[in-house]
Image (spheres, helix red, strand yellow):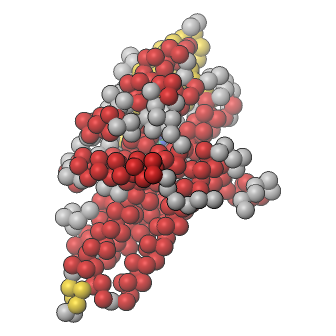
Amino acid sequence: MDFELTEEQRAFADTARAFAASEFAPHAAQWDREAIFPREAIARAGELGFCGLYAPERIGGLGLPRLDAALVFEEMAAVDPSTTAFITIHNMATWMLGTWGTDAVCAQWGEHLTAGRKLASYCLTEPGAGSDAGSLKTRADRDGDHYVIHGGKAFISGAGATDVLVLMARTGGAGPSGISAFAVPADAPGIRYGRKEHKMGWNSQPTRTIDFDGVRVPADHRLGEEGEGFRIAMKGLDGGRINIATCSVGAAQGALDAARRYLHERQQFGKPLASFQALQFKLADMATELVAARQMVRLAASKLDAQHPDASTYCAMAKRFATDAGFAVCNDALQLHGGYGYLGDFPLERLVRDARVHQILEGTNEIMRLIVARKLLDGDADLR
Ligand SMILES: Cc1cc2nc3c(=O)[nH]c(=O)nc-3n(C[C@H](O)[C@H](O)[C@H](O)COP(=O)(O)OP(=O)(O)OC[C@H]3O[C@@H](n4cnc5c(N)ncnc54)[C@H](O)[C@@H]3O)c2cc1C
């Protein structure tokens, strides 16, 4: 067991840190304030390979292990969790397309997606099917060599600004086994986008509902076999949960760094805040929680890379722990800034708002507990 990063892994992280410092740091506050989707900055991330980090080489992806991808996401999220989280969702959807897509689908979109010239959304949630995603109602009915899609999705990240929708829809009967996955052109006739949602955070990426009214897609746009869609969606989310957990670790690192600086700069009672032991202990606890979260995420990523039978359980545990710990660290860092932490002049309030949603999406933290508890109570999990 080696807890040290390799030279190559450090180089990935250094490249991502430098990229985030030059491309995200000067603009992140404005993107958040004005709800600007930074399409050009994302394309430049694509030029470095960051839009297809673990996508298969077959479509121009780097095919990296999840652990290496996490190192890149963490550095970018320390500066801008919202934009980074969108890039992670794009990576997840691109990996799904490249892993289960037909040659035709891969030829049409693959290299454009991994290069960041085109973007992908992941479309699972519906107004009536959130945590219970297996009950989704959007239908894809076979009509000759096409499928015809009717229904609606909710909370779709990037919707309206992306080029391809990785869509889960029902081709069979009730339950998860009746669901199939598709790659759908985002501008296909019959697709209608809702208004841009007003959100607490994640403002640098649009979130919209999508309606499908008789949308026709060729049968070769199906990903995998009929009835395999829910399994594919969950496979995507195993990695997605590591990614979102990583965005929380990154946000927490950004917040901790800001707090460390501020404790030295700010004076009260004639002394720097750093001299008050209560605040020193707070900082020590924040750093400890952060390192524990980071190690847990890396453990889950390595389990996924090794295709460990309990990888999904580790991913759920890491997502729950790191997103809770990451939010708490961001919030504590805001507290250490006093009233200034609450102002838009410092990044803390943005980091807190951005990190909050990580406890909700890609499966809520209650659903993460459900996944872990089921595994424990079934009695076949060996988590030693
Ligand atoms: C900003 C944002 C972006 C998103 N992006 C995407 C996206 O790109 N693609 C996509 O498909 N989805 C996306 N989502 C949707 C997200 O995954 C869902 O919001 C999430 O899965 C929860 O579903 P829900 O909102 O319907 O809540 P519900 O399922 O209605 O849950 C409400 C509450 O009940 C709890 N609960 C539900 N069932 C149980 C249970 N059995 N036991 C205990 N507690 C339970 C939940 O944890 C939660 O606290 C996004 C959401 C947000 C907010």
Where's the N terminus, which quadrant? bottom right
Q: Nearer the viewer, residue 149 or 105?
A: 105
- Residue 106 visible in the displayed image: yes
Q: Nearer the viewer, residue 285 or 131?
A: 285
Quick check: 335 above or below 162?
A: below
Kindly identify the residue that appears in the image at 38 percent across and 73 percent down. Answer: 332
Q: Is residue 378 left or right of residue 218?
A: right
Kindly identify the residue that appears in the image at 42 percent across and 84 percent down. Answer: 281
Indicate the position of residue 312 as horizontal and vertical percent values.
64, 48
Q: Quadrant of residue 111?
A: top left
- Residue 76 visible in the displayed image: no
* Residue found at the far front of this picture: 7
Q: Nearer the viewer, residue 212 or 302?
A: 302
Quick check: 65 above or below 169?
A: below
Kindly identify the residue that appears in the image at 38 percent across and 63 percent down. Answer: 253
Q: Is residue 348 left or right of residue 100?
A: left
* Residue found at the far top of this picture: 144
Kindly identify the residue that appears in the image at 60 percent across and 33 percent down. Answer: 232
Indicate the position of residue 160 as horizontal and vertical percent values.
33, 31
Indicate the position of residue 90 as horizontal and vertical percent values.
42, 37
Q: Is residue 100 left or right of residue 127?
A: right
